[in-house]
Image (tube, grey):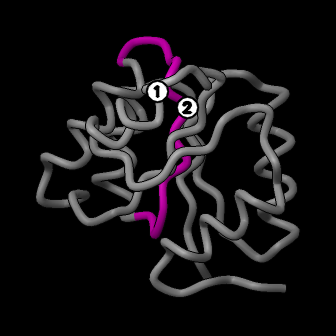
């Protein structure tokens, strides 16, 4: 089963995404701030991380850099989830260590395609 670390501080979004991912056969681990994201990425060894970039405690940009700089989590692919859809934001997310970028509002079908492309073993139901 593919393990997804979902890092999102807005309850409506994490509730929506976690329920839909679980229905698709994913094991979902939740973090609600950037420090939790870093800690859980290292401890839980997820297959892919969905990382909101606007987070409390540590922002997503900082969290992505810390996740990628740690031997325990450096190889875990990160998909940036952000309402920042301005010119240059995708490049900024990729430069911070993210492997892909998904602008909000979430297009769930597209997000699944992105997860399946990055996760080492895909969960499809």
Secondary structure under tag 1 reads: helix
**Residue 54 is one of the magenta-drawn residues:** yes
Residue 53 lies, in percent from the top left, at 49, 26
Q: Residues within 10 Å of mark 2 (few under 14, many from 20)?
A: many
Front one among 50 and 102:
102
Badge 1 is on which residue?
89
Residue found at x 39% / y 55%: 99
Q: Is residue 19 left or right of residue 69?
A: right
- Residue reaching furthest top? 56
Badge 2 is on which residue?
52
Residue 45 lies, in percent from the top left, at 36, 64
Q: Is residue 30 above or below residue 36?
A: below
Residue 21 lies, in percent from the top left, at 78, 61
Span of residues in magenta: 46-58
Residue found at x 86% / y 57%: 20
Q: Is residue 83 left or right of residue 41?
A: right
Query: Of callouts 2 and 1, which one flags the residue occurring earlier in the amino acid sequence?
Result: 2
For the N terminus, which image quadrant?
A: bottom right
Front one among 125 and 98:
98
Question: Rounded to the nearest whole Å, what is the CA distance between mark 2 and mark 1?
Answer: 13 Å
Task: Check contact, mark 2 vs mark 1: CB within 8 A.
Answer: no
Residue found at x 36% / y 51%: 41
Residue 107 lies, in percent from the top left, at 82, 48
For the C terminus, which image quadrant?
A: bottom right
């Amino acid at each position: 089963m593919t393990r997804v670390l979902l890092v999102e501080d807005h309850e409506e979004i994490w509730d929506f995404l976690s329920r839909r991912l679980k229905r698709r056969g994913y094991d979902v681990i939740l973090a609600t701030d950037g420090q939790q994201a870093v800690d859980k990425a290292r401890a839980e060894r997820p297959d892919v991380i969905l990382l909101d970039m606007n987070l409390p405690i540590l922002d997503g940009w900082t969290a992505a850099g810390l996740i990628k700089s740690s031997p325990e989590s450096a190889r875990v692919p990160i998909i940036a989830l952000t309402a920042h859809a301005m010119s240059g934001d995708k490049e900024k997310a990729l430069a911070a260590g993210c492997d892909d970028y998904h602008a909000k509002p979430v297009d769930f079908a597209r997000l699944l395609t992105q997860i399946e492309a990055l996760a080492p073993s895909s969960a499809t139901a």
